[in-house]
Amino acid sequence: MIDLSDRTLAQLLARRLRSARAFQLFARRLGPNDVVYVSALAFGADDKVVEAKASAMTLDEAIVNLLSNLDQATAPEEP
């Protein structure tokens, strides 16, 4: 379980999204005692729109997973 304060989570988001060029974030708890679903739209390295998604039991874990997926989705393709 990841233990992040609101301040730490905000700093993490600000730091990670600064380079990702994300333009839409979405988060939703799917039901009581259910998973949190998050997604983000961003510009990839080739300036095409990409979407990253993640889900987890807590918002903290879902956002950390989303940021990892967003890093992969926006990374330049290697030849």
Image (cartoon, rainbow, N blue to C red):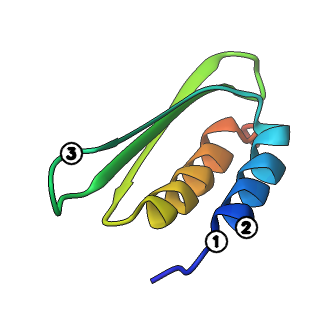
- Taking the spot 61% from the left edge, 74% from the top edge, the residue there is 4
In space, the residues marked 1 and 2 are separated at their CA atoms by 5 Å
Residue 67 in picture, x, y percent from top left: 61, 52
Residue at image position (84%, 40%) is: 18
> Label 1 neighbourhood size at 10 Å, few (<14), some (14-19), many (20+)?
few
Residue 41, relative to residue 18: is it above or below? above
Q: Can you tell which mark lies on residue 30?
A: 3
Q: Nearer the viewer, residue 14 or 42?
A: 14
Q: Quadrant of residue 22?
A: top right
Q: Which residue is mark 1?
A: 5
Residue 10 image-quadrant placement: bottom right
The image shows residue 14, relative to residue 32, as above or below, that is: above
Figure disc tally: 3
Q: Position of residue 58 (x, y in %)?
A: 38, 65
Taking the image as shown, residue 1 lies to the left or right of residue 34, namely right
Can residue 79 be seen by looking at this rendering? no
Q: Nearer the viewer, mark 3 or mark 1?
A: 1
Residue ID at (18%, 58%): 34
Disc 3 secondary structure class: loop
Q: Is residue 53 left or right of residue 9?
A: left
Q: Are marks 1 and 2 in contact (CB under 8 Å)?
A: yes
Q: What amino acid is labelled 2 in the image?
A: Thr
Residue 51 at least partly seen: yes
Amino acid on which disc 1 is placed: Ser
Q: Decide if residue 45 is on the left or right side of residue 51.
A: right
Residue 8: which numbered mark, if any?
2
Question: In the rendering, at what x and y percent does residue 54 appear?
Answer: 41, 50
Asked if residue 12 lies left or right of residue 6, the reply is right
Residue type, numbered disc 3: Leu
Residue 44, x across and y down, in percent: 70, 27
